[in-house]
Image (cartoon, rainbow, N blue to C red):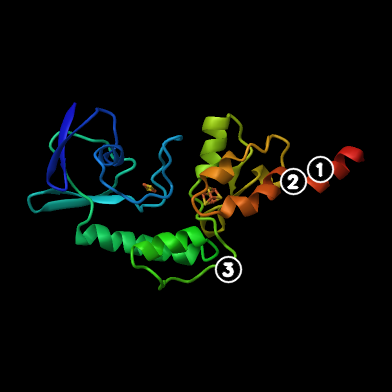
Amino acid sequence: MITLTINDQEVKARKGWTLLEAARHHGVDIPTLCYHEAVAPSGACRLCMVELKDGDWSKLVASCIYPVADGLNVYTETPKVQNVRRWVLEMLLAACPGSEEIATLARRYGVTTTRFATKSANEACMVCGLCVRVCEEVVGLSAIATVDRGVHKRVGAPYLKPTDVCVACGSCVTICPTGAMAKIFDTVRGEPQTKLTQLQA
Ligand code: SF4
Ligand code: FES
């Protein structure tokens, strides 16, 4: 077992756990979006940042990918953590104006407006990749992929062509933290009517 402190409370953690796993095990709340215990963490959204401190030294790290270690002093609600959390939520409000889930989470942390350039009103995907990872790691398929790069990066069927690989299990819709996959889903597997027409041709 490993001994560390979280918000000045000494706690034990198993070797191999992340800071997030240790915090949640001990009932400490850290907000997350791109994390789900069913798939490997990616550290994509940075909402789960916490502060490590040692004397005058301090560093912000993503708790979902940072491993526990003996003697770490972890803080989950310092001014630096709250600032970066608000900053991330502002960016997400701009990136996902069509997501009620993001707006609700942001409101919970007092963020209701954004200084960043806002995407189109229907955009809800934060390109966290959870849908891609659950399809590959849990379902054992790769019906969803990230396509394009940089600001054009998005998720969809590989090569943006509806795919028969999809078994319509809905895992991607369930795991999506923003509600975006519910809207993208039919473009991945193809509209049922289109498939019927193809089968009849
Ligand atoms: S559709 Fe949902 S789960 Fe997939 S990348 Fe976008 S926000 Fe993440
Ligand atoms: S939940 Fe840790 S980076 Fe997204």
Q: Secondary structure at mark 3?
A: loop
Residue under the point 45% across and 65% down? 93
- The percent position of residue 118, horizontal first and vertical second, equals 50, 70
Residues tagged 3 and 2 counted as in contact (Cβ below 8 A): no
Amino acid found under the numbered disc labelled 1: Lys
Does the rendering let one see residue 92?
Answer: no
Q: Tell me if mark 2 has few (under 14), some (14-19) or many (20+) residues whose alpha carbon lies within 10 angstroms of its own.
A: some
Q: Is residue 124 left or right of residue 17?
A: right
Q: Mark 2 or mark 1, which has the lower sequence index?
A: 2
The quadrant of the rendering that contains the N terminus is: top left
Q: In the shown orientation, is residue 151 left or right of residue 169?
A: left
Could you tell me which secondary element the residue under label 1 belongs to? helix
Direction right: furthest residue? 201
Badge nearest the viewer, 1 or 3: 1
Question: Mark 1 and mark 3: span between their CA atoms?
Answer: 29 Å
Residue ID at (24%, 28%): 14
Q: Check disc 3 and report the residue beneath it.
A: 120
**Quadrant into which the C terminus falls:** top right
The residue positioned farthest toward the left in the image shown: 55
What's the distance in space between the residues labelled 2 and 1, CA to CA? 7 Å
User: Residue at (22%, 55%) from the top-left corner?
Assistant: 77
Up-down relation of residue 68 to residue 117 (above or below)? above
Q: Looking at numbered disc 3 in the image, what kind of residue is underneath it?
A: Ser
Query: Which of the pair 28/142 is nearer the observer?
Result: 28
Which residue in the protein does label 2 denote?
190
Residue at label 1?
195
Q: Residue flagged by tag 2: what amino acid is it?
A: Gly
Q: Is residue 70 left or right of residue 166?
A: left
